[in-house]
Image: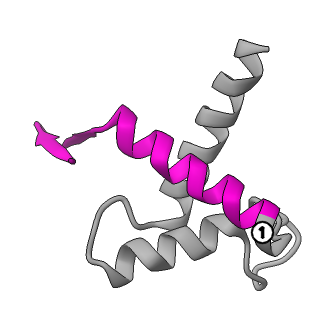
Amino acid sequence: LLHHARGHYQGDLLNSLIYAVIIDLIDTHHLNPMRSESESTGISACDVVARAMANLRRRPQGYSTIKRIYLTQNAAQDDLF
């Protein structure tokens, strides 16, 4: 599912799946998509996905990477409409 090439993870499908999980967490559990910049604690949907990926020992697993995927995919969704 995830291909590694020259240090970069290729995976439009994986990014789309991560985005879908984040949206589901927002809708189902009423989480904010990301942490607010003013708070270092608290759990966002991106935090949950990052922790799950780390627990599964899958990449990407850092909060900042998951947040970037969310922002990129969300912008792409906005471009569609």
Q: Indicate the quadrant where residue 36 lies.
A: bottom right
- Left or right: residue 68 versus residue 1 is right
Q: Quadrant of the C terminus?
A: top right
Image coords of residue 64 (percent x, y): 55, 59
The answer to whether residue 39 is magenta is no
Image coords of residue 48 (percent x, y): 59, 75
When the figure is inspected, residue 51 is found, relative to residue 77, above or below; the finding is below
- Disc tally is 1
Q: How is the image coloured?
A: one colour
The answer to which of 28 and 67 lies nearer the viewer is 28
Residue placed at 21% from the left, 47% from the top? 2
- Left or right: residue 16 versus residue 76 is left
Image coords of residue 63 (percent x, y): 54, 66
The answer to which of 73 and 35 lies nearer the viewer is 73
Residue placed at 88% from the left, 70% from the top? 38
Residue placed at 82% from the left, 65% from the top? 32
The answer to whether residue 19 is magenta is yes
Image coords of residue 27 (percent x, y): 80, 61
- Left or right: residue 35 versus residue 46 is right
* Amino acid, disc 1: Thr
Q: How would you rate the neighbour count of disc 1 (Cα within 10 Å): few for under 14, some for 14-19, many for 20 or more?
A: few
List the residue tagged with mark 1.
28
- Left or right: residue 67 versus residue 32 is left
When the figure is inspected, residue 74 is found, relative to residue 18, above or below; the finding is above
User: What span is in magenta?
Assistant: 1-27
SS class of the residue under badge 1? helix
